[in-house]
C-alpha cells in the first residue's frame, strides 16, 4: 500500500478527504497525513500538519487537492521541501481509473469510486424538503463538478430532446459550465450564453426584457433562474416570445413538493428569505402548483422526474435525487 499525503484542505480539499474515508484500501493508499498552510480547526481521521512537516514525514507521494493552484504548489513543494517531481500528483488525475466503478457521471462520462459532498446544512432544507438543497454526500462529480441536478438536466436533454442531434439555435441562461462546454462543442456559433451579471457569458441579458427578436431559438435553457426573478410572468412571456413555434424551454427551479408556491411581501429580509425560500437571493419558493403556474403563462408543460424515469440502480449509480424534476415548456 502506498503511503500518501494529501495537500490542501480548502473547501474542496476537505470534501475530497472525507469522500475517501473507508475506501483508502480500495484506492490503494494509506493516508499518513493531511497538510495545509493555514490553521485547520476541523477534525479529520488523519493527523493534520503544516508543510514544514514534509521534511520529516515518510511518504511515497503527495496528492494536491487544489486544481487551480496545482503548479504553484508543485513548484513550492519541490523547491522548499525537497519533494521529487514524480512524487506529486493532482488528486483529480490520480483518481482516474482507481477503485470501483461505483458511480457514473453522464456529463463528463467518467466512472468513479467516489463523489464529493455538496451544499451546507440548514434547517430550511430539511424542514421544507427543498429538492436539491442542503448538505448531501456524494453529490458532486470530482472531474467535471456537476451536481445531481446538473446530471439530471443533462440526462433529460440527451434523452427527451433532440438538442444534441439536431443543429439548433440555443439561448442558455446562467449556464452550467460543464453543460456549456458540451453544447458549445456541438453548436458553436448557434449557441449563446446569457446572464444578468457579466461573469464569462456571451451576452448580458435581463430575462424580463430579452434583447433578441421574436421566435428565433430552438431551445432556451433556464435552470435555477426564475426563483431569483420578481417579475416571473414577464420573464416567462419573454422566454416564450423568443422561442420558435416548435421550440422547447428546458427549465428547473428549487421546489418544495409538500406545499404550494410561497411568495409573500412580508418575507423581505435576507434572514427571512433564507428561512422561507432557502436562499437570501431567492424571491419565492416554488411548490406543487408549479405546473399550473407555467400553464397559466400559456405553455404546454411536460415534467420529467428522476424517480419516474429511471430504475433505482441507475439513480444510485448516477447519484441523482429521485424527486429532482426537469420541465420542458412548449408553446
Ligand atoms: Zn462529471
Image: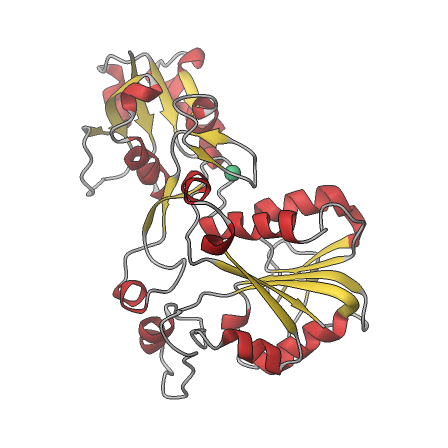
Q: Residue placed at 56% from the left, 34% from the top? A: 109
Q: Residue placed at 36% from the left, 53% from the top? A: 119
Q: Is residue 264 left or right of residue 275?
A: right
**99 over 165 or under it: above or below:** above
Report x, y in % for residue 148. Answer: 46, 49
Foreground residue among 7 and 251 = 251
Report x, y in % for residue 245. Answer: 79, 69
Q: Is residue 309 left or right of residue 113?
A: right
Q: Residue placed at 22% from the left, 15% from the top? A: 56
Color theme of the render: secondary structure
**Figure quadrant of residue 108:** top right
**Figure quadrant of residue 300:** bottom right
The quadrant of the rendering that contains the C terminus is bottom right
Q: Residue placed at 73% from the left, 56% from the top? A: 192
Q: What residue occupies the far bottom of the structure in this picture?
A: 265
- In the rendered image, is residue 9 in sight? no
Foreground residue among 312 and 6 = 312
- In the rendered image, is residue 224 in sight? yes
**232 over 266 or under it: above or below:** above
Foreground residue among 259 and 189 = 259
Report x, y in % for residue 153. Answer: 56, 53
The quadrant of the rendering that contains the N terminus is top left
**10 over 323 or under it: above or below:** above
Amino acid at each position: 500500500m502506498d503511503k500518501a499525503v494529501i495537500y490542501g484542505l480548502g473547501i474542496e480539499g476537505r470534501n475530497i478527504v472525507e469522500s475517501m474515508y473507508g475506501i483508502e484500501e480500495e484506492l490503494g493508499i494509506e493516508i499518513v497525513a493531511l497538510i495545509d498552510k493555514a490553521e485547520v480547526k476541523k477534525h479529520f481521521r488523519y493527523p493534520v500538519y503544516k508543510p514544514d512537516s514534509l521534511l520529516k514525514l515518510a511518504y511515497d507521494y503527495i496528492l494536491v487537492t487544489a486544481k487551480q493552484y496545482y503548479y504553484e504548489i508543485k513548484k513550492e513543494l519541490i523547491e522548499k521541501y525537497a519533494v521529487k517531481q514524480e512524487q506529486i500528483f493532482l488528486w483529480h488525475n490520480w483518481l482516474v481509473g482507481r477503485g470501483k466503478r461505483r458511480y457514473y457521471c453522464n456529463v463528463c462520462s467518467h466512472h468513479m469510486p467516489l463523489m464529493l459532498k455538496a451544499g451546507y446544512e440548514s434547517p430550511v432544507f430539511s424542514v421544507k424538503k427543498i429538492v436539491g438543497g442542503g448538505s448531501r454526500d456524494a453529490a458532486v462529480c470530482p472531474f467535471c463538478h456537476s451536481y445531481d441536478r446538473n446530471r439530471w438536466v443533462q440526462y433529460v436533454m440527451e434523452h427527451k430532446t433532440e438538442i444534441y442531434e439536431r443543429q439548433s439555435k440555443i439561448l442558455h441562461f446562467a449556464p452550467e459550465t460543464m453543460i456549456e462546454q458540451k453544447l458549445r462543442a456541438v453548436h458553436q456559433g448557434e449557441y449563446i450564453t446569457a446572464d444578468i451579471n457579466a461573469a464569462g457569458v456571451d451576452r448580458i441579458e435581463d430575462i424580463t426584457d430579452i434583447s433578441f427578436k421574436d421566435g428565433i431559438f430552438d431551445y432556451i435553457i433556464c435552470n435555477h433562474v426564475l426563483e431569483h426573478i420578481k417579475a416571473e410572468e414577464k420573464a416567462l412571456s419573454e422566454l416564450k416570445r423568443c422561442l420558435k413555434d416548435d421550440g422547447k424551454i428546458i427549465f428547473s427551479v428549487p421546489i418544495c413538493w409538500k406545499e404550494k408556491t410561497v411568495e409573500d411581501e412580508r418575507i423581505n429580509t435576507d434572514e427571512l428569505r433564507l428561512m422561507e425560500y432557502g436562499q437570501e437571493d431567492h424571491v419565492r419558493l416554488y411548490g406543487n402548483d408549479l405546473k399550473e403556474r407555467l400553464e397559466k403563462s400559456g405553455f404546454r408543460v411536460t415534467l420529467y422526474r428522476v424517480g419516474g424515469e429511471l430504475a433505482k440502480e441507475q439513480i444510485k449509480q448516477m447519484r441523482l435525487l429521485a424527486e429532482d424534476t426537469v420541465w420542458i415548456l412548449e408553446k
